[in-house]
């Protein structure tokens, strides 16, 4: 809840369409600034995470590592946005 409060106070809003794949694609093309979620399966995020990476974005797990596909947690976006969120998640 603390992370959600931080995002609500420091962004223009939080939006979720209900599909991690679509949310990640919207992040890759710039419609969304960032995406984060936990408890997702690899098939929910594999294609979208690759699309964000190929678009030049940052994709990681909540510790800033590379285990986002099987680690059940993902954050994606550009590094200027992802880093402050990671810092808050790890505080």
Image (cartoon, rainbow, N blue to C red):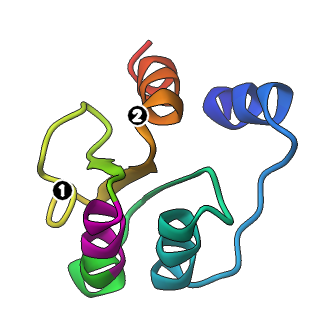
Q: Give the residue drawn at x 25%, y 31%.
A: 63
Q: Give the residue drawn at x 18%, y 66%.
A: 69
Residue 22 falls in image quadrant: bottom right
Residue beneath disc 2: 79
Circle 1 sits in a helix, a strand or a loop, which is it?
loop
Assess whether residue 52 is covered by the magenta stretch. Answer: yes
Instruction: Residue 36 in the image: state x and y as whole percent.
Output: 49, 52
* Residue 41 seen: no
Instruction: Residue 16 in the image: state x and y as whole percent.
Output: 70, 69
Residue beneath disc 1: 71
N-terminal label among 1 and 2: 1
Q: Is 54 left or right of 16, judged from the image as shown?
A: left
61 to 71, vertically: above or below: above
Count of numbered badges drawn on the protein:
2
Q: Main secondary structure of the magenta part?
A: helix
Start and end of the magenta stretch? 48-55
48 to 55, vertically: above or below: below
């Amino acid at each position: 809840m603390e992370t959600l409060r931080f995002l609500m106070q420091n962004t223009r809003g939080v939006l979720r369409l209900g599909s991690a794949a679509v949310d990640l694609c919207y992040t890759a093309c710039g419609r969304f600034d960032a995406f984060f979620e936990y408890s997702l399966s690899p098939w929910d995020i594999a294609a979208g995470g690759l699309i964000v990476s190929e678009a030049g974005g940052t994709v990681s797990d909540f510790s800033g590592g590379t285990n986002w596909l099987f680690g059940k947690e993902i954050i994606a976006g550009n590094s200027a946005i992802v880093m402050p969120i990671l810092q808050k998640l790890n505080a």
